[in-house]
Image (cartoon, helix red, strand yellow):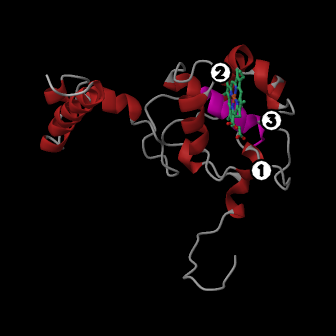
Amino acid sequence: MFVTCRNYHFVILATLSVCCLLPVVAHSEVTTGQLSIGRDASAEDIERWDIDIGPDGDGLPAGNGTAKKGKPIYEAKCTSCHGPRGRKDRDKLAGLSGTSQRKTIGTYWPYATTLFDYIRRAMPPTEPGSLTDDEVYALTAYILNLNAIIKTNKKMNARTLPKVRMPGRDRFVPDDRRGGPEIR
Ligand code: HEC
């Protein structure tokens, strides 16, 4: 009754701050259940996100494909941006020699397995994740074939893809420096 208008606001603000802060301080380890928002990730959720492929092929799924099968898929879903046979200058996928300084798949990528991983998770950019594993194997085979790394009918699968030796592999060396002024 005796507080001024300004003090009244102060009392309300102070009370609100204490009320808002208390639960956070008291329950710093909140779980989704306590807040009633979100849910724990299920095994299927984790499986859908867990798609990375190791350089040695670890994580490659079942399925297979050849360059022959990949060609029509490429022409339907990739040519618009990468050009016929991967030669469009921007985002070029093939057509450079192994000694070119420009970084592309045939000149620079050290592992063929990365190609599978990249296409499956990112391409086409308008619909990432929309390709089946067989389609990704076929597209991987097609791009490797465009770079003259494998033959048209060579089947790519979890066993054969890690064995493909990329021309750019030797451009990388293990980093075994132990510190100090050494430069490699
Ligand atoms: C809408 C245009 C578009 C379409 C369609 C598209 N791409 Fe791409 N792609 C890109 C762009 C842009 C990049 C470069 C992305 C970056 O560097 O972040 C790229 C990069 C790539 C790369 C990596 C190239 C490198 O040397 O780094 C591969 C491999 C690739 N795309 C394959 C495909 C395949 C296979 C398809 C068809 C299924 C496809 N792309 C469809 C736009 C497209």
Q: Amino acid at mark 1?
A: Thr
Crowd rating for badge 3 (residues with CA inside 10 Å; few <14, some 14–19, many 20+): some
- Residue 75 drawn above or below residue 91: above
Find disc 3 in the rendering and name its residue.
92
On residue 107, which mark appears?
Answer: 1
Q: Is mark 2 within 8 Å of ligand 1?
A: no
In x, y percent, where is residue 2? Answer: 16, 26
On the rendered image, what quadrant is the C terminus found in?
A: bottom right
Q: Give the magenta-colored segment's residue range.
A: 137-148
Separation of marks 1 and 2 at Cα, in angstroms: 24 Å
Crowd rating for badge 1 (residues with CA inside 10 Å; few <14, some 14–19, many 20+): many
1 or 2: mark nearer the eye: 1
**Observer-nearest of 134 and 160:** 134
Find disc 2 in the rendering and name its residue.
69
In x, y percent, where is residue 171? Answer: 72, 62
Mark 1 or 2 closer to N-term? 2
Q: Is residue 30 at least partly visible in the picture?
A: no
Mark 2 or 3 closer to N-term? 2
Mark 3 lies on a secondary structure that is loop
> Residue 126, located in which quarter of the rendered image?
top right
On the rendered image, what quadrant is the N terminus found in?
A: top left
On residue 177, which mark appears?
Answer: none
Q: Is mark 3 within 8 Å of ligand 1?
A: yes
Marks 2/3 in contact by CB < 8 Å: the verdict is: no
**Observer-nearest of 144 and 87:** 87
Q: Is residue 159 left or right of residue 89?
A: left
Q: Is residue 91 left or right of residue 3?
A: right
Q: Amino acid at mark 2?
A: Lys
